[in-house]
Amino acid sequence: MGILDINNPASPSLVGWFDTPGTAYQSRCYNNKIFVADGTAGLRILNFAEPDSIYEIGYLNSYHNALSIFINDTIAFLADDGDGVYLLDVRITGVKEEKRNLLPIMFNVFPSLGALFTIDFTLLGKNPICLVIYDCSGRKIKTLFNGVMPEGNYRLYWDGSEELNRKVYILSHCGRIIQG
């Protein structure tokens, strides 16, 4: 990933460089941060406040092939060819020199064998979270969990029902994890 000074478009000059671990397919800038769709290395987040000393401050392992990134207001949309689209809050705070894995604020819900939907996620510390399922129009379908979970990898299942335990027959859903 290179940073160019284009003050003189006829003669741009390289002022900073960072070698990401994957193949950088696309990048977007937000508040001195570069969000890189980095192929099999997922999403890489770089701090370029000082272009001559770029460093990585965060990442999201998207598990397949991160191909595209788009930022709208404060939400980043990361397209992965195996997992669909991740939505992340780009207002990263409290990150200094420590590189950290990010938790997507939204995720796709995929049907598994039988009538259950599988939801996999990782928490990096003990966190109060609220896990909610929405339909594609943004209508809340069901709250699956609202409480505190310790650090760890989790797999939850959703039976396709709404709050009153009636089945919903919508093919595409997304979920949202709210921390804190």
Image: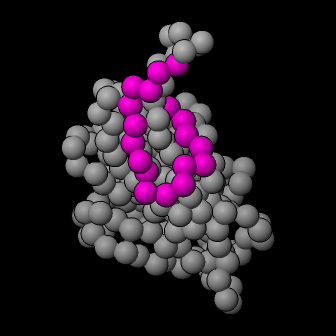
Q: Is residue 14 magenta?
A: yes
- State the residue lying farthest toward the bottom: 114
The total of numbered circles placed on residues is 0
Most foreground residue, 175 or 95? 95
Residue at the image point whose x is 59% and y is 44% from the top: 26
Residue at the image point whose x is 54% and y is 15% from the top: 11
Percent position of residue 53, x then y: 29, 33
Percent position of residue 80, x then y: 62, 59
Q: Is residue 89 above or below residue 32?
A: below
Q: Is residue 36 magenta?
A: no
70 displayed left or right of 42: right
Most foreground residue, 10 or 44? 10
Q: Is residue 75 above or below residue 30?
A: below
Q: Quadrant of residue 33?
A: top left
- State the residue lying farthest toward the top: 8
Asked whether residue 134 is in view, the answer is no
Percent position of residue 67, x then y: 63, 54
124 displayed left or right of 35: left
Percent position of residue 150, x then y: 26, 70
Most foreground residue, 59 or 3? 3
Tell me which colouring the rendered structure shows: one colour
Q: Provide the residue span drawn in magenta.
A: 12-32
Q: Is residue 58 above or below residue 1?
A: below
Residue at the image point whose x is 40% and y is 53% from the top: 59
Q: Is residue 76 above or below residue 132?
A: above
- State the residue lying farthest toward the front: 11
